[in-house]
Image (tube, rainbow, N blue to C red):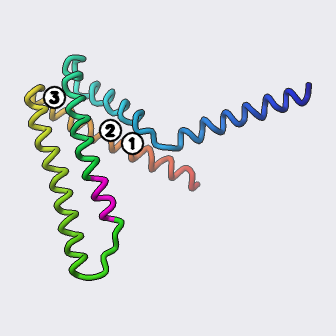
Amino acid sequence: MKRSIFVFFFLLTLCFANAQNKQKYFNRERFQADLEQYITRKAGLTPKEASKFFPLYSEMLRKQRAIHDELKTLKRIKPTTDKECKQNIMKRDKFEIEIKDIQRTYHEKFMQILPACKVYDIIKAEERFHRQMFKRAADKMGHKKK
């Protein structure tokens, strides 16, 4: 009987530890769902507007993420000569401009399906959401160090 109780509590402890470990890792799908819900609420999107907007929004993010991944790889390289440094800087600038161009192009597409005021609210909501997420992550990191 004691052994059964011990095994039960041991398994329960493992389950709790596993659940806590899963919460420590970034979940892209959960993040995206939370972002969409936040944007929908803050920008006051109707279900019809949301169904038109989010596929375009996801497409924009995919394109930006691909370039951002290249930029991230480039940032890990430590050039050793002036010529290599210059090339690295120029490539970084090019990637950052490409990301911004994609954003501009999609903002124009968004305004074809939504009023400009809602697109503006979406942009502001996205900024607020990211700020909140960074603050939450920083707070969690700060609590771990204490």
Q: Which residue is mark 1?
A: 133
Q: Residue at x 74, y 32 (%)?
A: 11
Q: Which residue is mark 3?
A: 118
Q: Position of residue 83 (x, y in %)?
A: 21, 80
Q: Position of residue 103 (x, y in %)?
A: 16, 44
Indicate yes or no whether the magenta region holds residue 137. Answer: no
Where on the picture, by quarter, is residue 146? bottom right
Q: Is residue 109 above or below residue 24?
A: above
Q: Is residue 81 above or below residue 19?
A: below
What secondary structure is marked by label 2? helix
**Amino acid under disc 1:** Met
Mark 3 or mark 1, earlier in chain = 3
Q: Which residue is mark 2?
A: 129
33 lies left or right of 83: right
Provide the major secondary structure of the magenta segment. Answer: helix
Where on the picture, by quarter, is residue 40? top left
**Amino acid under disc 3:** Lys
Mark 2 or mark 3, earlier in chain = 3
Q: Residue at x 23, y 36 (%)?
A: 59
What secondary structure is marked by label 1? helix
Indicate yes or no whether the magenta region holds residue 70. Answer: yes
Q: Is residue 1 above or below residue 92?
A: above
Mark 3 crowd level (few <14, some 14–19, many ≥20, 10 Å Cα) = some
Where on the picture, by quarter, is residue 145? bottom right
Q: Are marks 2 and 1 in contact (CB under 8 Å)?
A: yes
Q: Nearer the viewer, residue 136 or 17?
A: 17
Q: Residue at x 55, y 50 (%)?
A: 143
Looking at the rendering, the stretch of residues picked out in magenta corresponds to 68-75
